[in-house]
Image (cartoon, grey):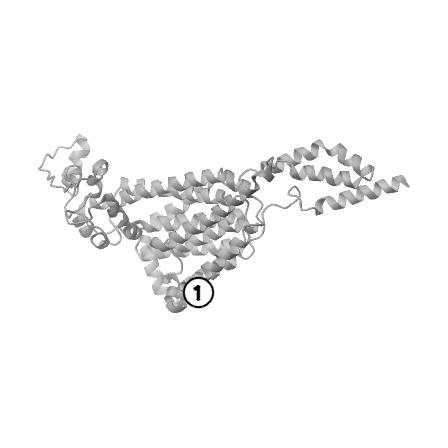
Amino acid sequence: MVSHSHSHSNQHLTTSMPRRSSPLFRKRGGGGGGLGLAAVAYIAVDYLRHLSPSWHELLQPLLWIVLALVAITRVPSYKHWSAELRSALVFIAALVFMLCTLLYEMISVRSVTAVLGLAWHGDTSPLPDTGQWILLGLNEKLPQVIVNLLRARIVGLHHYLMLFVMLAFSVLFGSIEAPGLGIGARYMFTMAIGRFLRAISFASTILPSPRPWCASTRFDVPQHPHRWAQKFYVPYASDTRAISTVIREDMVYDHGVVHDDEYRPNWGLMSFLADFLRPLPDGEAAWINLLKKLEVAAMIFYTVDTCLLQSLQLWLGRYEAYGGWSSAFIWTLVAHSAQREVRERHHYTVDCIAAIYVGFLLWKMTGFLWPLKDTSRQARLNKLEKIEGKLYQAARDSDLDQVRDLLKQVDSAGQTKNQSGKEKGMQLFAGGTIIFALTVVLLAFVLTSDG
């Protein structure tokens, strides 16, 4: 009779333990849920701006409100705010680093245009690009429906930004591993490094734009070259003998007259930027206003790397969180964006190819930011190992109350002590995080050009 009772209790313990909702036995990660459908819905609604602007003005704000409300309703049931708190400083640091790289990028964009003057950009022919040749050739071979689809402006930077915001907020639904601020920090840090490397690249070797007219329409800089270009580039730009001589002597040998009639505004500590930004006397008075005007200009001259890097980080993040049809859909959008940027001559094909493999490498290098190592799970396993003997003894004694108490100890292992005293502070942090995140996203769409 005792043996039967013991076997019954052991069987009850064996069958009940995996059914518990304890984090020890819970399967990590989750399905994509409705995230893929939400992404498709957002792109479809936004595309209405081309088909029916009136419906677009009505449906897009409504979709934003619905998505925000759905995310807010999941906040009370979210159980990983302690992990979010640990990632908050890393998230802020990544945000500051990205803003610094954006500032450097904006200065570099204007500098590479200003140093040679507008005359050079207008007179210099674009480089031959075989990718553009292939796309023009396919236009003659493919059906018109497919050509129109390839030409369609389906997605842009703000779409990829919004889709990644959805990916980060899907942590509230258990679709990706916590913390959401961790994947946000990884995304911003990766983008910051990518944009920094991109700015260094185009500032190191100045290439003629695929759109020669854009410089004069987007930048208010002098027509003539800067004194640096007059001394180190202009004398040896086209003369074969001069190029050969400067290679052989490895010194500046043409000591012609260098005109230095640059306008130098009084910008205080930032006056050194005058040589890089080259303002005009009748132009903007403040250096920060010159950089603000670069938002659109940078998009025209150097947008494809940003677009592909941002879209690629989105695809890699979704693929690492969970695969499926939605990841394949995002990759299709990445390929469509790449060919459209080449087709519209926003950038050269080589830059699209470089953006793809650089994006892969950068995402793999920043894996230490997300997903984080689950230390609480290891703590629970260690606790289970320590009380294993007591657990089986309680099962033999048919002491189910003792079994429950021991399992509660396993569940609570690794959790922060005195958590009840910090519950109010955690609630404030949760509310502040959601409000901050939604505000930043809203400002990104309202105050910037194309996100």
Residue 317 or 250: which is nearer the viewer? 317
145 sits to left or right of 266:
right
User: Looking at the picture, how far across and down is residue 364, in whole percent?
Assistant: 47, 40
Identity of the residue drawn at 12% across and 39% down: 260
User: Looking at the picture, how far across and down is residue 438, in whole percent?
Assistant: 45, 51
Quarter of the N terminus within the rendering: top right
User: Looking at the picture, how far across and down is residue 109, in whole percent?
Assistant: 27, 45
Crowding at mark 1 (Cα within 10 Å: few <14, some 14-19, many 20+): some
251 sits to left or right of 53:
left
- Amino acid on which disc 1 is placed: Leu
Q: Quadrant of residue 397?
A: top right
Q: Is residue 118 above or below residue 232?
A: below
Residue 21 or 363: which is nearer the viewer? 21
Identity of the residue drawn at 70% across and 46% down: 20
Identity of the residue drawn at 11% across and 41% down: 261
Specify whether residue 380 is in view. yes
User: Looking at the picture, how far across and down is residue 305, in whole percent?
Assistant: 35, 48
Residue 192 or 127: which is nearer the viewer? 192
Q: In which quarter of the image is residue 413?
A: top right
Residue, disc 1: 59
Q: In which quarter of the image is residue 147?
A: bottom left
Specify whether residue 157 is in view. no
Identity of the residue drawn at 38% across and 40% down: 96
